[in-house]
Amino acid sequence: MIHLARPYLLWLFLLFVPLIAWYVYHYRNSEPTMRVSSTRSMAKLPTSWKVWFKHLMFAVQLAALGCLIVILCRPQSHDSWATSDVEGTDIMVALDVSTSMLAKDFTPNRLEAAKDVATRFVTGRDHDNIGLVLFAGESFTQVPMTMDNATLVNAIQGVNVSLGYIEDGTAIGDGIATAINRIKDGKAVSKSIILLTDGSNNTGVVAPLTAAEIAKRFDIKIYTIGVGSNGSAPYPVAIDYAGNIQYQTMPVVIDEATLQQIANATGGKYFRATSKGTLASIFKEIDTLEKTHMDVQRFSHTEDHYHPWAIALLVLLLVWMVGEYTVLRHIP
């Protein structure tokens, strides 16, 4: 609904009264006069169309002034908060960004495949609080829990491996601990961590099973996903002088036993993703997580609607100028 931000300025329309009075007075006293014995012979002469055109130009001026007053009143849609009851859940995605995620047993590699599937997963969950934790040799929060899917998708798409900005390695326990710290105070009844990794814990401060016990105390389920094909895969092993990553075929090693124990301890589930297709089906199954009712507040911004009045003002001014300086032959 359209409202006026400054409705008190509507009082400016009272200016029409003195303007119309002045126009009538000026019109009556600006006509030339001459003395004649009788005007009977001219009584039936028609009024010139230019007289009516002059009145029309005055009406156009008033209309232009009216448009200006409306613009000053600022017609707009007001900001508002809307509260709605939705079903949602709290989810933290903990993503391994160690260099081994560049292995090419997925197309184009494990990390890009995981990012693509995670993006589609996030896009389809409009009413969930979802956050993103990245871990390699250490862990950090990339995006706190949010319902802003666009921000989350952009963050996922911008994820790269740990080359250069954090210590390399696989600190699974630290990744879980960081995710717990972000999700434990969430309002949803259902809280879950989705952990994606392609290796085994080899560094970090918190042991994976210790982190799982902490998650269990906060009633947080952990769904673990081991990313990697069966057998062997091309792994990154070095960077040449031109900055290109060199690959070497090596056996795929995933600590499935630990990932299974983490999932079982928290009431979650372990999945093995051997291809991008199976990874997508895993996320589809996780998509059926338990949901809870939550009150969500959404903010609508203010939008001004002066554009039609501004266009009308310009058109009326153009009509007035053309009429005044052509038909009525006024010199600027």
Image (cartoon, rainbow, N blue to C red):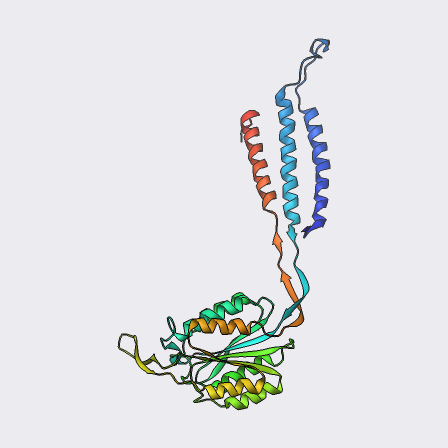
Instruction: Give the total number of marks visible in the rendering.
Output: 0
Image spot of residue 2 (x, y percent): 67, 50
Residue 130 visible in the snapshot: yes
- In this view of the protein, which residue sits in the foreground, 69 or 82? 82
Vertical arrangement, residue 157 with respect to residue 33, above or below: below
Image spot of residue 203 (x, y percent): 44, 89
Left or right of 11? Residue 182 is left
Image spot of residue 323 (x, y percent): 57, 29
Left or right of 254? Residue 26 is right
Residue appearing at x 55%, y 86% in the figure: 264
Image spot of residue 192 (x, y percent): 57, 78
- Which picture quadrant has residue 252? bottom left
Residue 144 visible in the snapshot: no
Residue appearing at x 59%, y 43% in the figure: 310
- Which picture quadrant has residue 318? top right
Vertical arrangement, residue 85 with respect to residue 211, above or below: above
Vertical arrangement, residue 219 with respect to residue 23, above or below: below
- In this view of the protein, which residue sits in the foreground, 281 or 296? 281
Residue appearing at x 64%, y 64% in the figure: 298
* Extreme residue toward the left, this view: 241
- In this view of the protein, which residue sits in the foreground, 58 or 299? 299
- In this view of the protein, which residue sits in the foreground, 276 or 11? 276
